[in-house]
Amino acid sequence: MHWLWVFIVGLVVGLIAKAIMPGKDPGGFIITAILGIVGSILSTFIGEKLGLWGETGLVHFLGSIAGAIVLLLIYHFFKRNTAS
């Protein structure tokens, strides 16, 4: 049940990050979910290790969105370079 929750929250985080980012995004549903999940995991690990936030809360959720946005920026950068 935990992994289902991780996937759902990651998808929501990925959709929010995709809505915030301007421009056309070449990724679909799967890429959105993966970026959301990985961004959430990375920001959780970094934020908790640096003592910026605890395991739950609004700041943690916002950090997950920021992590997904950073990964989306990196994805756009590499996807744009390979398409040219």
Image: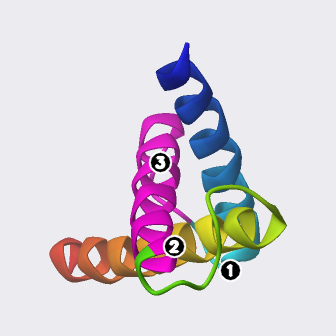
Secondary structure found at label 1 = loop
Residue that extends furthest to the right in the rendered view of this protein: 58
Give the position of the C terminus as an image quadrant. Answer: bottom left
Badge 2 or badge 3: first in the primary sequence: 3
Viewer-side residue, 76 vs 41: 41
Answer left or right for 78 relative to 37. Answer: left
Q: Residue furthest top?
A: 1
Number of numbered discs = 3
- Which residues fall within the magenta stretch? 25-48
- Label 2 crowd bin: few (<14), some (14–19), many (20+), radius 10 Å: many
Up-down: is 14 above or below 80? above
| Predominant SS along the magenta part | helix
Asked whether, in this view, residue 60 is left or right of residue 81, the answer is right
Callout 2 secondary element: helix
Reading the image, the residue beneath label 2 is: 67
Question: Mark 1 highlights which residue?
Answer: 22
Instruction: Give the residue type at disc 2.
Output: Gly
**Residue at the disc numbered 3:** 37
- Residue 77 among those drawn in magenta: no
Tell me the amino acid under the disc marked 3.
Answer: Ile
Q: Is residue 5 above or below residue 53?
A: above
Q: Are marks 2 and 3 in contact (CB under 8 Å)?
A: no
Q: Residues within 10 Å of mark 3 (few under 14, many from 20)?
A: many
55 relative to 51, above or below: above
